[in-house]
Amino acid sequence: MKENKYDDSRFFEKYSQMERSKKGLDGAGEWYALKRILPDLKGKRVLDLGCGYGWHCKYAAGQGAAFVLGTDISQKMLQTAAERNPDPKIEYRCAAMEDLEFDAGAFDVVLSSL
């Protein structure tokens, strides 16, 4: 089901006040558990579904990923991601995750938090 509450100005404003929005991965409660199960990202092609502000994308790029694609249904989220977490290895794309199609093996690592 395609739903995009994040482009609603009031909803986005409230989301931007959350600790995860202000502090990035350090403010995301699930991050410490997720980080422990991620593989080595060096040289990998990474897909982040529902990337939001792009915190995981920036982490992957910083860990040596060769390419990172962050997708989100929200233009507001992607605009913030591009401003806060830019990197030449990262591409941000607006799309609902159920509409995405990739060839088998296009990515080495796929993640989606929340």
Image (cartoon, rainbow, N blue to C red):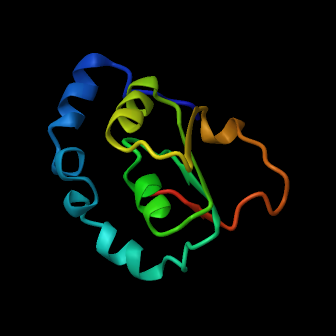
Q: Observer-nearest residue: 65 or 34?
A: 65
Image quadrant where one finds the C terminus: bottom left
Image coordinates for residue 6, horizontal then vertical, percent: 37, 28
Residue 113 makes an appearance in the image:
yes
Please tell me whether residue 1 is drawn above or below residue 88 in the rendered image.
above
Indicate the position of residue 29 as horizontal and vertical percent values. 24, 65
Residue 114 in view? no
Quadrant in which residue 82 is drawn: top left
**Residue positioned 23% across, 44% down in the render:** 21
Image location (x, y in percent) of residue 44: 64, 68
> What residue appears at the point 43 percent right and 63 percent down from the top-left corner?
62
Q: Residue furthest top?
A: 9
> Looking at the figure, which quarter contains the N terminus?
top right
Q: Residue furthest right?
A: 103
**78 displayed left or right of 98:** left
Q: Position of residue 26 (x, y in %)?
A: 21, 63
Seen in the image, is 98 located left or right of residue 60?
A: right
Query: Can you say whether 54 is above or below 107 in the image?
Result: above
59 displayed left or right of 48 = left
